[in-house]
Amino acid sequence: MLNGALFAIIEEAATAVMILTEEVTQDELLASRLTRGEVVRQLLTIADTLAMVPAETRSQMPELAWDGWNATAHVLNATNPKTDELGDALWFAVRSLAPATVMWLRVYRQSQPELFTFQA
């Protein structure tokens, strides 16, 4: 399966988000056009890649915030999101979804290594 490749992309993007926002407040993130743009790009990479994970694999990883990532992508992809809604979704993804996703991927890599293989 290609799950290993998908999870590598997700982990790399989530780690990038955490590095980009490590010392940043919510207001600073929203005010920084460059950082915010890159963070949004990485978050959408995570959400889009998670959407490609097969349902069978998803069922084996119930702790990942599948619905949370879907909702976040919906807000980030909106044409004219409300500023508060965008800021809240962005900050929640930065401070909760991305770190939790990295943590759970590491847990699953230990407990279910077969999900992380790079077989075609």
Image (cartoon, grey):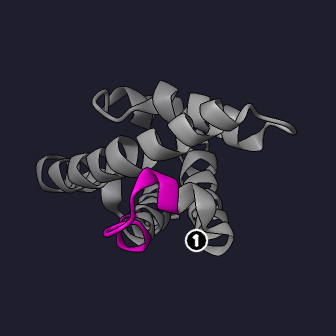
Instruction: Judge whether 71 appears above or below 4 on screen.
Output: above
Judge whether residue 60 can be spotted in this image: yes
Instruction: Judge whether 33 appears above or below 75 on screen.
Output: below
72 to the left or right of 7? right
Camera-nearest residue between 59 and 42 = 42
| Residue 20 lies in the magenta stretch | yes
In the image, what residue occupies the spot 69% across and 33% down? 74
Residue sitting farthest toward the right = 79
Which three-letter amino acid code belongs to the residue tagged 1?
A: Thr
In the image, what residue occupies the spot 63% across and 52% down? 44
In the image, what residue occupies the spot 46% across and 45% down? 91
Tell me the magenta residue range.
Answer: 18-28
The residue that disc 1 covers is 35
Camera-nearest residue between 31 and 41 = 31
5 to the left or right of 102? right
Camera-nearest residue between 9 and 82 = 82
Quadrant housing residue 109: bottom left
Judge whether residue 2 can be spotted in this image: no
| Residue 97 lies in the magenta stretch | no
31 to the left or right of 60? right
88 to the left or right of 75? left
Residue 5 screen position, x and y as percent: 48, 66
